[in-house]
Amino acid sequence: MSKPLAPEDLARIADRLERAERQGAAIPKVTDDYPGLGLSEAYAVQSELRRRRVAAGERVVGWKAGLTSKAKMVQMGVNVPGIGFLTSAMACPENSAVSTQRLIHPRVECEVAFMMRDTLRGRDCTREEVLAATAFVFPALEIIDSRFAGFKFDLHSVMADNASSARFVGGGRARRVHDLDLRSLGVVMEKNGRIVATASAAAVMGHPADAVALLVAVLADMDEELPGGSIVLSGGITEAIPVAAGDSMVARFQELGSVSVHFE
Ligand code: OOG
Ligand code: MG
């Protein structure tokens, strides 16, 4: 067993991640230098990054669950889901142009997004409670950008790195959950007009609301709740698609319409 990390170590890890993000330059994964980093310490680093962003004027607008589909777990070689926070600075308008200049090696995921009406808390949150607390769902693209070289990491490193969060885009049509079957919802992802992935939302833990319930449970472990008014990304339905300047991505969802983004 490696010994637990000191608070100075956690601050130093946060410094490194912050710098990598700001400079758009990859660093080795955290556990290369700190093999003793535990999962709760990884989330402590993530909370420190969140605290710094809020201190710098960003607003926390929601949360994301990640590694919630088999496709994502297989692609990343990590088979335990986790969570990250989303801030006002990460939000991009539908169909906007995102600069790749400050990104390291961006990838795009298609996700079902939830707009929460009511606050949820606790370790035993259920799918039904999530659905009852949801104002509406809408389609989203998440742009992830691991700060780690080669987009390679383990669970603890990636959760310290705020689950690779970089940007996100909401679009399409807002729909009430009770008018939909969120499991059988099909999605087609296109890159530059060519289909690159297809799946149904059931790929996310059998039902994307279960990913929101999982997120609430992880938040409870950190003594946090999911506030009403939060956006929640429930996790990539297919594998993530690498993009570069010049690329366009669109996800077409059954029932929810489409959402798109360009890179320049
Ligand atoms: C971690 C983040 C995964 C998702 O939707 O599964 C994620 C990563 O793959 O870099 O956002
Ligand atoms: Mg995601």
Image (tube, helix red, strand yellow):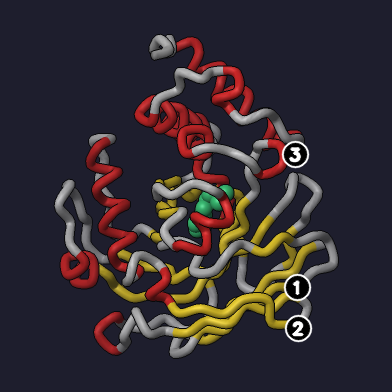
List the residue tagged with mark 2.
193
Dot 1 or dot 3: first in sequence order is 3
Q: Position of residue 206 (x, y in %)?
A: 33, 70
Are the residues tagged 1 and 3 within 8 Å (C-beta)?
no
Dot 1 or dot 2: first in sequence order is 2
Q: Position of residue 223 (x, y in %)?
A: 23, 35
Q: Residue at x 62, y 76 (%)?
A: 197
Are the residues tagged 1 and 2 within 8 Å (C-beta)?
yes
Residue 215 sits above or below residue 222 on the image: below
| Foreground: disc 1 or disc 2 | 2
List the residue tagged with mark 3.
24
Q: Secondary structure at mark 1?
A: strand
Q: Is residue 204 in view from this perspective? A: yes
Residue 239 sits above or below residue 48 on the image: below
Q: Position of residue 130 (x, y in %)?
A: 23, 65
Residue 107 lies in quadrant: bottom right
Q: Residue at x 54, y 48 (%)?
A: 77
Which disc number belongs to residue 248?
Answer: 1
Q: Secondary structure at mark 3?
A: loop
The type of residue carrying mark 3 is: Gly
